[in-house]
Image: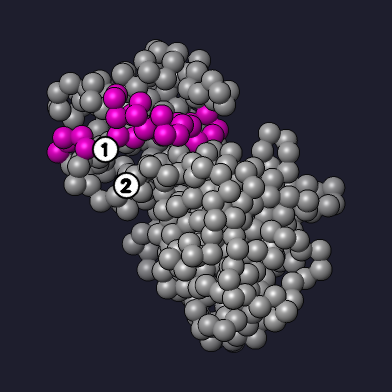
Amino acid sequence: MGFEQFLVSPAVIDITSEDKTGTFKELASALCKAADIGRHKHIVDEMLRREESASTFIGSGVALPHARDIPIKDEFAVIVGRSVSGINYDSTRNAHVHIVILLVSREDADSVRQLEILAELASFFKSDDVREKILEGGGAVDMKGLLAYVKKTPSDRKPRKKPAAKNEDWSPVLNAAINLAQDFKARAIIVFADVIKDDDFVDQLGEHHKIIIVTNNKTRFDLAKDKRVLGLVQAPPIPVSRTGQLKIGILLALSRGLIAKEDRVICVSGLAGGSVFDTVVCVDIAREYDFFFLKSKNLLPADIKPEVFERVMGLAGEIAVEGREGKAVGTIFVLGDTNSVNANVRQLIINPFRGYSEAERNILDPGLVETIKEFASIDGAFIITGDGVILSAGSYLRPQGANSQETALPGGLGARHAAASGITECTQALAITISESTGTVNVFKNGAVMLSLSRPVSKEKDIINFT
């Protein structure tokens, strides 16, 4: 968790204000005092200006305001505030906030690093454990102590009389994975960590093979210097079936270059939301997932950053499951090759992202999530550069030169999917669609469906199945 080096206050600040502006003044004043930078009015003005672009409420009772061009000593500064009673943060969205994290940066601060820190902060403070610790009892909260607590495994936090019993159910599964990895000379063992709450598997597997951890909460792990871990992959924050875990894990590991087409991997998974690993699968990438490499040896076009692809996949999954205000939503995200894409686009409405700086409209900014979900209900597509800048929403795709007879779409896919297929056939872009009628998420590349994610129709509505 790289943000901890920029904390300017060792304690969480108690906020007394009940409105957004008063909260900003309290946090800015506390930050200025801790960082010894003088008056706080400029910081408050910058935060309020940012709020005019889009609310920094990120859900789960958490807000993440930020301000740039602040004369601080270090590149960034972070301070955390809380209100047990709650703050009326955004009345139009009925946003009631209990935890507010303020991030400020210098004029010369790295904008990419700023987005990374914002993502770290969002992931950390939206964790149930963290929010409970900050708000429980109303007592003082030391940030260093909180960070140390989160880095511990659940078994470290709450010692049990029989610590070994915890692993008895799934140790044979991990042993089988180790043996298969040796027999098949696997590149790595991919573990779907969200199946369980304990992190002991890292020690058991890492002694024998490189591991790739797939999780929707990266802050759970502090593995930056752990040479046993080949990579940490951000999974969409939605529960998926075992087959779904397998496909999305391999897709994202390929997108990050952690594995290659010629590799074999061992995948360890279990029932989403369960408590044990119960499945081990050996996968030959070239044989099982050749459709990932249609007309290209690389999964992602060169201009698309893996973290942008991960972010869009996560947003698409959330929109498919949640919809908007109880209604199903369908939309298209078009990623990369924006010069070619723009030649095949006509704006349906006034572009809501026009006129804002690139820093204010980057999809990696967690503060934009609610805005993107709101605009997803508008007809048309989001056009996004490979590094995450949203160029437009409500854009009509009219691909030129696409051969619809050459690329046959699966039955049941309508105009939205035909447009996504066409734009990826005549450009090097990727397109991710969400079907309004079924909630299915499809990933298009070179005019064809590369991956399909279906919303379930069974009674288990919290499980997403891949087909």
Q: Quadrant of residue 180?
A: bottom right
Q: Is residue 278 left or right of residue 41?
A: right
Using the image as rendered, state which of residue 363 and residue 337 is in the foreground: 337
Range of residues picked out in magenta: 44-73
On residue 114, the disc is: 2
Residue 83 can be seen, yes or no: yes
Using the image as rendered, state which of residue 404 and residue 138 is in the foreground: 404
| Mark 1 residue type | Arg
Position in image of residue 73 (x %, y %): 14, 38
- In this view, 305 is above or below 149: below
Secondary element type, mark 1:
loop
Q: How many marks?
A: 2
Residue 236 belongs to magenta span: no
Name the residue tied to disc 1.
68
Q: Is residue 378 left or right of residue 123?
A: right
Q: Are marks 2 and 1 in contact (CB under 8 Å)?
A: yes
Q: Residue at x 54, y 51 (%)?
A: 347
